[in-house]
Image (cartoon, rainbow, N blue to C red):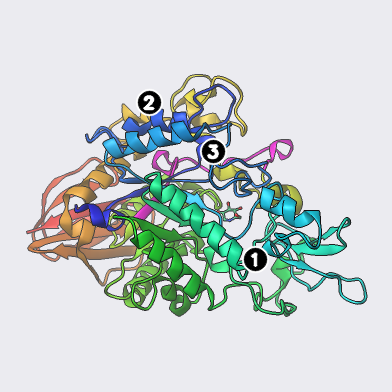
Amino acid sequence: MTDAQWWKNGTVYQIYPRSFKDSNGDGIGDLQGIIDKLDTLNDGTENSLGIDAIWISPFYPSPMADFGYDVADYCDIDPMFGDLETFDRLVTEAHQRGIKIIIDWVPNHTSDQHPWFLESRSSRDNPKRDWYIWRDPKPDGNRPNNWGSIFGGPAWEWDEATGQYFYHMFVKQQPDLNWANPDVYAAMLDVLHFWFKRGVDGFRMDVVYLIAKTPGLPDNPLDPDADPSLPEDDIFSRQIHLYDGARPEVHEIIKDFRRISDQYDDRALIGEIWEDDIEKWVEYYGENGDELQLPFNFRFIQLQKWAADGAKAIVDMMEGAVPSAAWPNYVLGNHDRTRPATRVGGQGQARVAGMMLLTLRGTPTLYQGDELGMLEAKIPVDKIQDPWGINLGPERTRDGCRTPIQWDGSNYAGFSTVEPWLPIQDDYTWRNYADMSADSTSILALYKKLIWLRKKTPALNIGSYTPLNMPDGIFAYIRAEGGQRVLVALNFTAESKPLSLPGIGRILLSTHLDRQGAVSGVIELRGDEGVIVALD
Ligand code: NOJ
């Protein structure tokens, strides 16, 4: 693997730092905790997970109204997570192990406690007033437009002292920045330089597609098909997002981000892009490959019905749409969505999903804990932390995928010495890193094998993708590079199915971790089984 292609050849692992490892006994994970676990992530041997890059969700000073996505200082570390010296050590220690560091950058909004916003709010003629989106009420006293906040309620908050509203797409403690203001633009680009100079290898850019706003901020049309049972406060879900969504101007801004990134060696930009229209989604690579290296592809997360034909349709669409000079990517889970092991219908399918993620042509992003098959936790209502769940009802909470990583069977799962910020799941006594590392048939053992096999096998890593025609319920493809051809066949059902092999081969890995060796003709693919077969 050449260094310059790390974002293409490597496996990315998302760390949600609050829930990864607590090193100082306050019930919340921290940067030292990440350092302490780096060997588990990659110590250069196949005993470790073998990931190549970590993306760390925000660790900046923050009042934590949205658990760090409300940033009060882009160039420092919240004391809860550590300090800049610890961050520098993390970069050094990670790099010593060949692990790249991707950090989260939140360009759409700051915290309402960010000094920029405090100044902006202080008076109408403050030089930073225009750094945010302030508007007068309508002549009838109403809000400037009908937009809703994703997290519930209107997207406008009244400021009594200065007699104007400010706009916030997320909670009211997250005012949107005004990217049309050149000083905002320059200050935010300085932030990129600050971290690049500190040695970070890339950024994951939070809702970057939303930063350019529609001139005039017109009302959104109401969605006639909106679900009538939506909570009254869910204004956002009852509208068609014609005017508060992505704007074409954002591409020019992203090109500037890329120009900065390209001033440094081997850096990469990943963007959080929610865009259903594939043509528009592809535009985030840039016409000349001059925007994001990886616009996150969330289509597996959005797949309504977990089935072979649905998964194949997504991959075929990606293969058809991503320009040949660009590189696909796949995301199975993250800190905002239901855990895959719950979503795909059980541990057997979670293994199949993991095998798919790690054998496709495209960078895989794995969310912490999915390698343990962690399930979506049921959080008691009085323990809900997420503002989405608090504002719009417990079924919206994202806490269920954010519970602490289960390291061992000791108190608090070895995550902390005190009660953590979110409850530990009951299955920690056996679903944990220590026990599953000792069990050669665990899903963790499978993930390790998959990640290392991908690394060692050019066909699986950078090879071409050719789908095969298969009976219902099976998704199969060949990855090929040079003379190497590898078949991947995934049974998305609980019934066994015959699999006709296109030649003679050798099973390299089964999701059941119980067979290897020479095969030919028709083999049985057991229920919930995926296999990787090296073809002769
Ligand atoms: C997307 C992040 O992934 C999510 O956790 C956050 O709440 C919103 N952006 C707002 O920053």
Find residue 371 and report its horizontal and vertical position in percent. Answer: 39, 41
Q: Residue at x 16, y 64 (%)?
A: 480
Mark 2 or 3, which is nearer the eye? Answer: 3
Image quarter where the C terminus lies is bottom left
Find residue 144 and report its horizontal and vertical position in percent. Answer: 81, 72
Distance between mark 2 and mark 3 Cα atoms: 30 Å
Q: Mark 3: which secondary structure?
A: loop
Q: Earlier in the sequence, mark 1 or mark 3?
A: 3
Looking at the image, residue 469 sits to the left or right of residue 28; the answer is: left
Q: Mark 2: which secondary structure?
A: helix
Q: Is residue 439 visible?
A: yes
* Residue receiving disc 1: 178
* Residue receiving disc 3: 77
Q: Mark 1: which secondary structure?
A: loop
Compared with residue 430, is residue 395 higher up or lower down, i.e. above or below?
below
Q: Earlier in the sequence, mark 2 or mark 3?
A: 3
What range is drawn magenta here? 364-385
Among the 4 quarters of the image, the one containing residue 187: bottom right
* Residue receiving disc 2: 434
